[in-house]
Image (tube, rainbow, N blue to C red):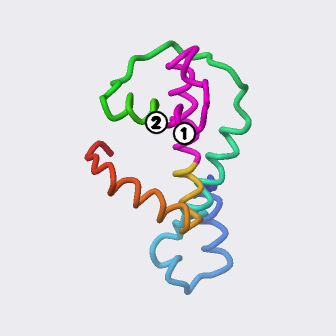
Amino acid sequence: MSKVIDFNELNTRILNTQPDTPANQLGGFALAIEAKTPAQLAEEALIELNELETGNTNRRSTFAMTSHAKRSIELVESVTNTKRYKNSIFAAAGLDVEMMNRLRLKAVSDPAIQTILDELKAETDRRDD
């Protein structure tokens, strides 16, 4: 997160307190920045997702139901006996997208999850990042 600095005030303070420093010789301008790591950014994104109200407030969008996607749903239904795709494919697919993206965010700081995601990507061999 960046901090806002009043450059005039900063310049005056530097000139008055540090007359022979390199910052003074450059005119006294400086900017304090707190850089965040990818893990910190991912954690903030997960917190934001957890704070969102449940439910769908967005308009319905279309998505490509490929033969692989359809078959993967059929296989999951047969193996796990889930009925989650029976009522609304849009709601179930939307939840799947959210869960997948939560995994991607958690993978930023968890190498084991990242390894699994890398393996899945290699298996599907998709070029749609």
Look at 46% across and 36% down and name the residue there. Answer: 75
Task: Determine whether the residue tagged by mark 2 lies in a helix, strand or loop.
Answer: helix
Residue 39, how many percent across, how many down? 59, 62
Instruction: State the residue in front, 42 or 76.
Output: 76
Work out whether 98 lies above or below 30: above
Tell me the tag on residue 75. Answer: 2
* Image x and y of residue 4, in percent: 62, 52
57, 70: nearer the viewer:
70
Query: Residue at 29% of width from left, 42% of height from top?
Result: 128
Dot 1 alpha-carbon crowd within 10 angstroms: few under 14, some 14 to 19, many 20 or more: few
Q: CA distance from mark 1 to mark 2?
A: 6 Å
Dominant SS type (magenta): helix
> Which amino acid is tagged 2?
Leu
Q: Where, quadrant-wise, is the N terminus in this rendering?
A: bottom right
Q: Residues within 10 Å of mark 2 (few under 14, many from 20)?
A: few
Check disc 1 and report its element: helix, strand or loop.
helix
Q: Nearer the viewer, residue 6 or 94?
A: 94
From the top left corner, tell me how far across and down residue 7 is, in percent. 58, 58
Q: Would residue 94 be counted in the magenta stretch?
A: yes
Numbered label attached to residue 79: 1
Q: Which amino acid, mark 1?
A: Val
Question: Mark 1–mark 2 contact, CB under 8 Å?
Answer: yes
Residue name at image x 53 percent, y 70 percent: 28
Quarter where residue 91 is shown:
top right
Looking at the image, residue 73 lies above or below residue 109: above
Q: Residue at x 59, y 65 (%)?
A: 110
Residue 85 included in the magenta stretch of the image: yes
Residue 42 spot, x, y in % from top left: 59, 53
| Rendered-image quadrant of the C terminus | top left
Q: From where the camera sits, is residue 6 visible?
A: no
Instruction: Specify start and end residues of the magenta stretch as a single range.
Output: 76-102
Q: Is residue 79 left or right of residue 44?
A: left
